[in-house]
Amino acid sequence: MAKPRIAFFDFAGCEGDQLQIANLEERLLDILGHVEVVSFREVATGHSDDYDVAFVEGSITRPEDEIRLKEIRKNAKVLVALGACAAIGGINCLKNFLAENVYREEVYGSSARWFSTYAARPLKSVVKVDAEVPGCPIDPTEFARITKELLLGRAPWISDFPVCVECKQAGNVCRYEMGKMCLGIITRAGCKAACVSQGAHCWGCRGLVPGANLDAARIVMDRPGTSRKAIQDLLRFFLGDTGAAL
Amino acid sequence: MTTYTVYKEQLPRLFEKWSEAHALYVPARLREGFYDLVPWKPGLEIAWDFDVAYNSPKRFLLPPRETLITFNRKTCEAAPVFEAPAQILFGVHPYDVKAINQLDQLLETGAPDQNYVRRRAATVIMAFEPLTVSPSAFWATVGAATAAHGYDLYWTKIGPASFTVEVGSQRGEELLAMGGPLLPATAGDKEGARRAKARIVFKARRSGLRYNWEETPRLLAKCWDSPLWRRYSQMCLACGSCNLVCPTCYCFDIREEADDQLEEGIRYREWDGCMLESFAKVAGNHNFRPKAQDRYRHRYFRKGKYIYDKIGELGCVGCGRCVRACTAGIANPLKVFNELWEETTHEH
Ligand code: SF4
Ligand code: SF4
Ligand code: SF4
Ligand code: SF4
């Protein structure tokens, strides 16, 4: 059987997710040994339009992005959203809470009218997405696992429960018991509660868990000593494209 | 059972000796108001007055993640993986000993869980009489104040620098003897231990069930349709924290991962919990407990009835961990059972 051909693409994002993949180093060679990479800016030059699996990074922020993304969709048998920007819109969506003239000025200054831009959105707002590798940045081991599952013809599994599960597995003291806020209660797990384990709190970078109880979460977050503004800022940080951010 | 008296000054030597062949865990303060069993090292300050270990002892017997088998995709061969490090848990409160006894019964009967059984056999339990009570605990009123068995040694602090140590197994006695000649406890010391127990149980009774805990299964049988389930579960985040922190919850999910050559692989298990939305999802995406209300009720039936029907004890030992862990403030067997009790009594 011919090796599946895979390609990497990026839209508005930092290419941090492709860098995370490059960081797999020796493991990357083993995994990529099962495939033929036809396009990957972080580790090789060259490009082809003949591929089976497209890993797409970044969010859609300009009307013309849609044309290119639809082209990729047409060429690829499987389209995988790579990272928060592609999967959930991520931090790019922060600008959606500003007036258009404000962010255009901010980014492009006096030449703003030369550039087209619109509200940032995830890939799934434009095309059908077959699988997601969530996170900002993605977890390289999860990328490796999902890729292997695709190679084995299995439906790639991503966790469908909140970060709290992995946080409890790790044995961390809950931020709420320390009088702090944390988005682990509504965020999809899979990062092993990385930020809490490192002493911070969850920012929601992996997107909403299916069935997230947002009404309850807002009540839980609204505690003495926490401002409504702080809650809103946290909910908008990564979750701007979801129903969580008001 | 034989009881000995041990002095604090003997402990460093004992710990030193034990840690030569065991991983030794002792209670320590994590931060103001938070304690846990942590790996012992010389000089570590023991938190004798810990109210509850933040993480329940089940993680030593049923780790959050554990490999069960390795397999080869080409040859279709598989081999079981057993890990059972020799370990000593020093400072397990009686309600947690009871929780372990429950796990023993539930995981060793029927088709014994071999991974659990092996870890358990390699684990020495040194029980410790609590000196303080966690604000969310209610163990004294759910029949979990005393553990009649399940420990190798039972330590009670009877003075600023002295303990009585009741022997629960030969293995325990041998470990104790590693510190030198053993000193049988005097009648006075034993009386001191009895009083220490009475004192803490009295303190722990401050908050608790308003009725005899043995009524709980009968109470629940009447409350399947109570409006309480919906009222509380509206706030449920389906985060599973209440399950995962619980010393008696033992559910897990099983997954597999191939290695990077796609030749070999492992099957492993990870903690799971009945409060998670997908827990009861089966083939065809059918979920037999799709609503938060169903899941919430199920957990209390599990704690108050289903486990009782199997082993004659409540599935809740009243440690209060879930009460603390629930950010939504709704996981609370004490409150739920008491409110159901009031509800049904007012019906007459
Ligand atoms: S710290 Fe955050 S992720 Fe961890 S249990 Fe608490 S809310 Fe959940
Ligand atoms: S803890 Fe939250 S913010 Fe941090 S990596 Fe995990 S999902 Fe992202
Ligand atoms: S149900 Fe709650 S209080 Fe009861 S044993 Fe479990 S964690 Fe402790
Ligand atoms: S800890 Fe609370 S919010 Fe989380 S699943 Fe349990 S009851 Fe629901």
Image (tube, grey):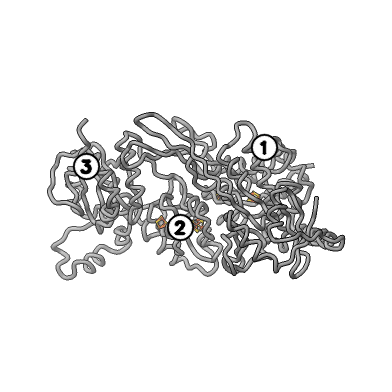
Characterize the local packing of mark 1: few (<14), some (14-19) or many (20 or more) Cα atoms within 10 angstroms: some
- Spot occupied by residue B142 in the image (x, y as percentages of width and height): 74, 49
User: Quarter-wise, where is residue A129 in the image?
Assistant: top left
Tell which subunit mark 2 falls on: A
**Residue closest to the eye, B34 or A158:** B34
Mark 2 CB near ligand 2 (8 Å cut) = yes
- The chain under label 1 reads B
Q: State yes or no: Cβ of the residue under disc 3 lies below 8 Å from any atom of ligand 2.
A: no
Can residue B335 be seen here?
no
Tell me the CA gap for discs 3 and 2: 34 Å
Sequence-wise, which precedes: disc 3 or disc 2?
Answer: 3
Residue carrying label 1:
B306
Give the label on residue A183, or none: 2
Q: Can residue B43 be seen from the camera position used here?
A: yes
Residue B10 vertical position relative to residue B298 in the rendered view, above or below = below
Residue carrying label 3: A6
Q: Are marks 2 and 1 on the same chain?
A: no
Tag 2, which secondary structure?
Answer: loop
Q: Are marks 3 and 1 in contact (CB under 8 Å)?
A: no
| Amino acid at dot 1 | Tyr
Measuring 64% from the left and 40% from the top, which residue is drawn there? Answer: B302
